Image: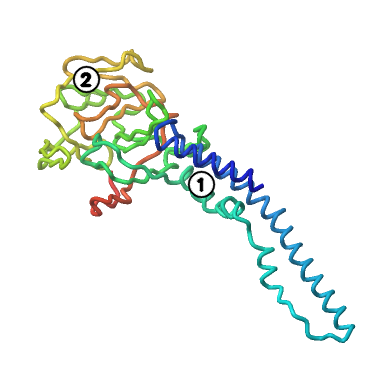
Amino acid sequence: MQAITSAILLAFVLYAGAWYLGAVEGNFALLLLLATCVTGAYWLAERFHFLPARQKAAALLDAQDAERRAGLQKMGISQVDGDLREAKARLLMQPWWLDWTAGLFPVILVVFLLRSFLFEPFKIPSGSMIPTLLVGDLILVNKFTYGVRLPVIHTKITEGSPPQRGDVMVFRFPPKPSLDYIKRVVGVPGDTVAYLNKRLTINGQPIATQAVPEFFDESALRYFKQFEETLGPRPHRLLIDDDKPVDVPVADQFDGRAGCSHTVEGVTCKVPQGSYFVMGDNRDNSLDSRYWGFVPAENIVGKAFFVWMNFGDLKRIGAFH
């Protein structure tokens, strides 16, 4: 078992190393599922086979010692040397290959259940959601609000509630589902979304915006126009860069492409059933539905709602909308 366990642990280490170096495209959900299954198998083997075997060996040692002492007492020898506590402790001690598998199972299981069905942590890698979310923010994503999905295969097992306009949503990037993206839901199924001359209209109704003080982007060392917009029950802020062009390059093909029109003024799209139109709050610096199309419901990961850490600015910790 030592050799088998060593090979399994080495395989995990090599996979993680290759992923870190960029040699393979990693899948953390799959890796965590495999780790849970493997350590769970060792935990069951420890509980029902290896531990009882060690306990049986320790009991046999006690019985042999008792038998030896009884024999010596019959011979008139009452004082017998020998303390079995150390020997029994060695017999009962969990070997390293069980300590690194069965011993880790409870922790890995808790992480797997929390991450798969309740809350998943993410790190914001880009500035597309500035000013709501900054590069380096570590956020939590609610995995059950939109319905619980099985890990790896993403099959929905509870309904939950559908995403609403204004939600900050994490999803698997449609052109490359192995990547997770985060954007704000702007259009829900059936909506007609227009973003023309940097103004947002939904179903023919302009979305009210109010100018607020300019935002200073420390990474770009410049100020941007900042507005407050209300898509859902709560307002959020967004940035506009007057130096960026209105029109955007668009993918040649995506599901629902026929329902979109792109002009020099911007884009207008009819959101198909079972899909969502998303945009970044940093409107002129966001690769979103204007470029690559809609987010299918099956690609949804969860609703982002809380910054739990930013090592560069602890004041960032807290809820957002």
**Residue furthest right as drawn:** 74
**107 sits left or right of 191 in the view:** right
Residue 203 on image: x %, y %: 26, 24
Dot 2 surroundings within 10 Å: few (below 14), some, or many (20 or more)?
A: some
Q: Quadrant of residue 68?
A: bottom right
3 above or below 197? Answer: below
- Secondary structure category for the residue under label 2: loop
Check disc 1 and give the amino acid type.
Leu
Colour scheme employed for the rendering of this structure: rainbow
Residue at 39% from the left image edge and 25% from the top image edge: 176
Residue 2 on image: x %, y %: 64, 48
Check disc 2 and give the amino acid type.
Val
Residue at 26% from the left image edge and 14% from the top image edge: 261
The residue tagged 2 is 248
Nearer the observer, 204 or 82: 82
- Residue 113: which numbered mark, if any? 1
- Secondary structure category for the residue under label 1: helix
Dot 1 surroundings within 10 Å: few (below 14), some, or many (20 or more)?
A: some
Q: Quadrant of residue 58?
A: bottom right
Residue 276 on image: x %, y %: 35, 27
